[in-house]
Each structure stands twice: as C-alpha cells, then as structure tokens.
Amino acid sequence: MNSATWLALAAALVASTALAHGDSRSQNKKAEMKSTEFGQTGDPRKATRTVKVDMSDAMRFTPAEISVKRGETVRFVVANSGRQMHEMVLGTMKELKEHAELMRKHPGMEHDEPYMAHVEPGKKAEIVWQFTKAGEFHYGCLIPGHFEAGMVGKVRVMR
C-alpha cells in the first residue's frame, strides 16, 4: 500500500474510534484524562460532593439546575428512572446542539467520553468532573428527540 492509502486507513480508524459509544458499564472513559472548555476529568478521590441527577421519560432532568464552585470536583450519580435509554452529556450549549444534530442524522452513532453517562432504564452511572472555568454550562440527553423535547439542564460555575 502507498502512503496515501495508509493515511486514509488511519483516518478512517480514528474517525470510527471517535464515534465509539459506551454504555454505563464502560470503564475506558474513566481512565482517560480529558480537558474541555468546561473542565476536565475529575479524580474520584478528590470529589468534594455528590450530586444525584434523575432522568425521566418526561424528558426532564432533576435537578434542572446545579451550582458549583470553580475548581470543584463533583461526582454526578446519574439515575434513569424511565423505561427508555437516557444519557447525561456535559458541555457548552453550542457543543450540545451540534452533537444533538449529529445524533439526529446518525441515530446509531456511538460515543464514549468521561463527561458522558449512558444509562439503561432502572440503572445508574457516574461522571466525575472538575469544573475549571467559571460560567454557564449545560447537560443534556442527546438521544434523538430527547434534547429537542427539553431534556437539558444548566450548570452555573461560580468564581
């Protein structure tokens, strides 16, 4: 194979891995250190508090708004009290809208990042996240139709 073919194969492999969807049992994402505009992977041993978040088939998160301090590491215990799959994805509103659009176009698209929890009905999962920047961020369920139905919440990160 020539170098162009190898390059194309490598690009396809990277793209397919980037779309790999995990479920609540995935542990690979927990070991990865990931930094984003809204924070970074948190060390579970340094979590300063636990926030329980419920996801329901009414397409709502409870609580719908969370306040944290800049630098705080939060353990989110995410429970799915519904009968269908839900997920909690942290991000900026722009990122969540873009990702929701991709999910609508590619409903089978899979993803697995440390700021996401995919939770089967009746199950729980955890996200441990450190909020490193003050501002307003969000969380949403990006399963097609859920975000559009209002399944979104707000994180206020105080200085």
Image (cartoon, rainbow, N blue to C red):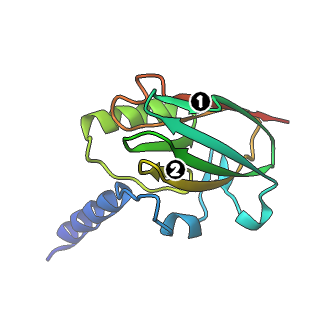
| Residue 93 shows in the view | no
On screen, residue 123 versus residue 139, left or right, reads left
Expressed as whole percent of the image width and height from the top left, the position of residue 108 reads: 26, 47
On screen, residue 9 versus residue 103, left or right, reads left
For the N terminus, the quadrant is bottom left
Expressed as whole percent of the image width and height from the top left, the position of residue 94 reads: 51, 30
Q: Secondary structure at mark 1?
A: strand
Name, please, the residue furthest toward the bottom: 1
User: Which is more toward the observer, 7 or 88?
Assistant: 88
Q: Residues within 10 Å of mark 2 (few under 14, many from 20)?
A: many
| Residue 64 shows in the view | yes
Q: Amino acid at mark 1?
A: Gly
Give the spatial CA distance, label 1 vs label 2: 14 Å
* Residue at x-position 33% and y-position 52%: 110
Q: Residues within 10 Å of mark 1 (few under 14, many from 20)?
A: many
Specify which label sits upstream in the sequence, 1 or 2. 2
User: Which is more toward the observer, 100 or 118?
Assistant: 118
For the C terminus, the quadrant is top right
* Contact, mark 1 vs mark 2 (Cβ under 8 Å): no
**Residue named by callout 1:** 153
Return the mark for residue 88.
none
Q: Secondary structure at mark 2?
A: strand
User: Which is more toward the observer, 69 or 10?
Assistant: 69
* Residue at x-position 34% and y-position 54%: 19
* Residue at x-position 79% and y-position 63%: 46
User: Which is more toward the observer, 131 or 50?
Assistant: 50
**138, above or below 132, in the image:** above
Expressed as whole percent of the image width and height from the top left, the position of residue 35 reads: 62, 54
Name, please, the residue furthest toward the right: 159
**Residue named by callout 2:** 116
Q: Amino acid at mark 2?
A: Met
